[in-house]
Image (tube, rainbow, N blue to C red):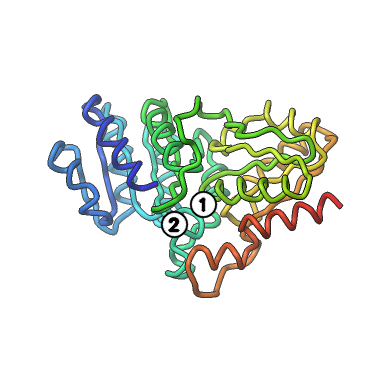
């Protein structure tokens, strides 16, 4: 995903002289082409994320289209106050790109886990929360986010994630992409667990269960038309995300249900739970621990269907 981000941003910067990249002292070689092409539009702000966010706000107020980039927990929690007041309160066009969202950096411990960022940032007025499911969605969402009038949080995975879309889909912020229809269950996935969601649907199909999948790449604003349709046509709707149970994508759906009234389907939320992950291991191990693999997700869904 991060390579798709760099490729797309470099291409966009060729076309739009307002695009400026600010990064927090990571991925230096990855941005070599961008730096050589646009030396006056690249800033290494060092390990000073709050300052980077404030600088981005100032550039946006001066007519630029800044993009900040660093590891997800550092570009969300560490500079939350600046995001809230400098970006959201002033409603300026800054893209906050967090790489390694969820448990992408599982082996580095809780400092690098990002399982509360969706909850934090979707609570802020004016902030969009974008969670692409694969590298194709990264490029399409970034193209739109840099043109939006206010701030956006772009939650990236890391690298080598499977590509789900073999051809670019029709994508618009706020409108989910339905990959397949389902009569019994609909799996609504956000972010880089999309391959696991597709794998779970395949396993359910082998068991005679009609399971649909949608990539809900926009957590805020939610695609409420999709939610209304799914909850009225299926027996079970499943939210799947590499994020904690509190306040994430599943929480956003639950809030919608509370406001929308009684639904035909019930909601099953699959996430990383309510505790810090203290075990050591790579992302695959972390997903197995949290029950976010295709096999464990399919088993939970079958149990919920009864």
Query: In front here: 188 or 273?
Result: 188
* Residue 73: assigned label: 2
Residue that sits furthest to the front in the current view: 206
Q: Assess disc 2: are there few (<14), some (14-19) or many (≥20) residues with their C-alpha within 10 Å of its C-alpha.
A: many
Q: Position of residue 283 (x, y in %)?
A: 49, 63
Q: Position of residue 255 (x, y in %)?
A: 71, 40
Residue that sits furthest to the bottom in the current view: 279
Give me the residue at 45% from left, 36% from top. 137
Give me the residue at 30% from left, 50% from top. 51
Q: Is residue 229 left or right of residue 174?
A: right
Query: In front here: 185 or 256?
Result: 185
Q: Is residue 225 visible?
A: yes
The numbered mark, 1 or 2, whose residue comes first in the sequence reads 2
* Residue 117: assigned label: 1
Q: Position of residue 225 (x, y in %)?
A: 68, 26
Q: Is residue 49 left or right of residue 172?
A: left
Give me the residue at 37% from left, 30% from top. 143
> Circles 1 and 2: CB distance less than 8 Å?
yes
């Amino acid at each position: 995903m991060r390579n798709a981000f760099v490729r797309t941003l470099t291409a966009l910067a060729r076309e739009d002289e307002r695009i400026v990249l600010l990064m927090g002292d990571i991925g230096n070689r990855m941005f070599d082409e961008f730096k050589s092409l646009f030396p006056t539009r690249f800033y290494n702000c060092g390990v000073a994320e709050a300052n980077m966010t404030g600088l981005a706000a100032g550039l946006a107020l001066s007519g630029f289209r800044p993009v900040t980039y660093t590891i997800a927990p550092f570009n969300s929690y560490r500079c939350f106050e600046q995001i809230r007041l400098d970006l959201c309160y002033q409603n300026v066009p800054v893209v906050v790109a967090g790489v390694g969202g969820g448990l992408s950096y599982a082996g580095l411990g809780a400092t690098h886990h990002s399982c509360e960022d969706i909850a934090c940032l979707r609570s802020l007025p004016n902030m969009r929360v974008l969670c692409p499911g694969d590298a194709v969605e990264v490029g399409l969402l970034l193209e739109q986010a840099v043109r939006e009038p206010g701030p956006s949080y772009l939650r990236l995975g890391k690298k080598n994630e499977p590509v789900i879309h073999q051809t670019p889909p029709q994508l618009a912020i706020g409108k989910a992409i339905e990959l397949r229809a389902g009569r019994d269950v609909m799996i609504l996935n956000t972010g880089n667990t999309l391959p696991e969601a597709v794998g779970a649907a395949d396993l359910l199909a082998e068991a005679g269960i009609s399971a649909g999948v949608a990539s809900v790449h926009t957590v805020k604003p939610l695609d409420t038309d999709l939610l209304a349709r799914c909850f009225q046509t299926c027996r079970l709707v499943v939210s799947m995300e590499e994020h904690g149970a509190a306040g994430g994508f599943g929480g956003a759906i639950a809030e919608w249900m509370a406001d929308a009234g009684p639904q035909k389907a019930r909601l099953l939320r699959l996430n990383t739970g309510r505790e810090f992950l203290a075990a050591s291991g790579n992302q695959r191990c972390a997903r197995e621990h949290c029950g976010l693999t295709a096999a464990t997700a399919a088993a939970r869904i079958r149990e919920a269907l009864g």
